[in-house]
Amino acid sequence: MLLILTGITLLIIAIYFYEGGDAVTRTQKRLNAQGVSMQKNGWREFNLDNIPGETPASLFGGMTKAEAILKYKLELMYPFDGKVGFYGGSDRPATRDKCRNNGGLKCREKLETAYLFRSTDDGKSFIRYKLEHGITNGIKKSEGRYFLNVYEEDTKRDKTYISDDFGERWRKLGDIKIETLWSKEKFIYSVSKAVPNEVQVNKKVSEYFYTKDGGKTSQPLPQKIVAYAKEASMQFYIYHGKLVFLVEGKLKFVDIDTLEEEEMALEVPKGKEIFQYYGAMVDDESQEIYVKLSDKGVKVGKNFYESIWYPLLNIQVAFPKHIPDNKQGFYLNVAGSYIGARVRIKGYLLHVWTMNKGKKWHYEMLPKYLFDTTYTGYGNNRIWMEALVLGERGKRGKSMFVMGKIKEQE
């Protein structure tokens, strides 16, 4: 693993120095020509080796030691919210040697243990928590209570833990997953189990429930609401106390207790179409409804560029033109006033964002960060992610936990 990582790093360095520089220059010229200003945010790296009780990763049967982060598969990023921040996952990579000749990935999923890392000082330090079997992959918050989801990949079962002291202590609520919350007592949750499908592979099947007393009593979620949620991959959002769904080009607002509905027809901006997979979403910070759009007729891929549309405000936020050498497409993330994306340009990370719904765009090149994971957290003007951090020229990079703090804009 270490030799592979070293080879990949050197290869990326070579790509940048021989052809990446031209791609970066083209990108900068295109952005500057569109009035996108270059700006640097505050970024810092955290090495898991500095966490009390942490040990190095063991590679090749213990023959080689490496940075501790390589022991973990990280799927949870919850940026610091003023009180606490979390990231987490499982030790699935660390079980590789145990499972090398006995079951491969399925074996590792069966053996993995969930871990959570907690910070109360905006990422300057972290404390590690070892939980039960599974992988931590989500946190929701309501009225000062935190709901932590742990998922067992082998059994397809979810478990929820709750904390009322900013994550210092956790207690198990049950074998459920919190889908959305009105309050710490009133929420929709799911119960999942694994069933074999036609190719004898375990598939996750979920049932949905609604409770008003923290789960002491509950009732099945009405089938009408389940049907609406299927339009958006079983995602649930609340707007002014009502569930909101995007169904057949209309916003539907549903009272969970009375099942009374209101609806609003949408007139999609010219030349755009709704990226239906997500449905209608509600931003946690701003509490605004937004919908993701794409150019009409363009499929997901290199030339796929999302835009964000606020239908109740009649505001569309779209990056002006395509970025050269972008092989990923352009997928925007929303968190409060922040709307932005990160893409790779010949190995480099390019970060483009706006803080005022597209009136002014900014960009920054992040030459130290050559790779990043899919699981990235956005919130409270912060970005948290795992990245391969380039060392001094010609030296091996290191995988580290990376935190960015978006500067306030004029």
Image (cartoon, grey):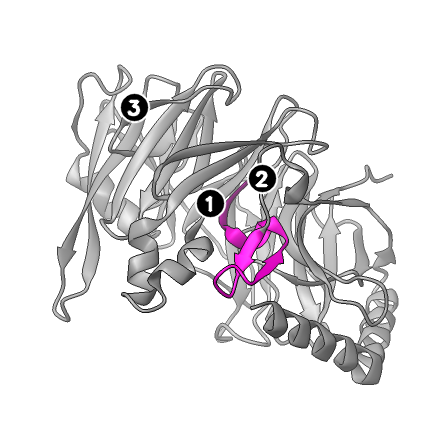
Residue tagged 1: 89
From the viewer's perspective, is 370 left or right of 144? right
Label 2 packing within 10 angstroms: few (<14), some (14-19), many (20+): few
- Tell me how far mark 2 sits from mark 3, CA to CA: 28 Å
Q: Alpha-carbon distance for marks 1 and 2?
A: 15 Å
- Which numbered mark, 1 or 2, is in the foreground of this view? 2
Kind of residue at disc 1:
Gly
Q: Nearer the viewer, residue 124 or 227?
A: 124
Say which amino acid is labelled 3: Leu
Mark 3, mark 1: which one is toward the viewer?
Answer: 1
Identify the disc placed on residue 54: 2
Residue 11 position in % (x across, y down): 71, 79
Q: State the SS at label 2.
A: loop
**Image disc number at residue 173:** 3
Disc with the residue nearer the chain's start (3 vs 1) = 1
- Image point 82% across, 72% down: which residue? 394
Report the residue that reaches farthest toward the front.
63
Question: Looking at the image, can residue 252 be seen?
Answer: no
Figure quadrant of the C terminus: top right
Which secondary structure lies at badge 1?
A: strand
Q: Read off the magenta span.
A: 57-78
Q: Nearer the viewer, residue 306 or 260?
A: 306
Residue positioned 46% across, 54% down in the render = 94
Residue 87, image x, y percentages? 55, 39
Q: Position of residue 110 (x, y in %)?
A: 28, 52
Judge from the rendering whether residue 72 lies leftward or rightward of residue 108; answer left or right.
Answer: right
The vertical placement of 62 against 405, above or below, is: below
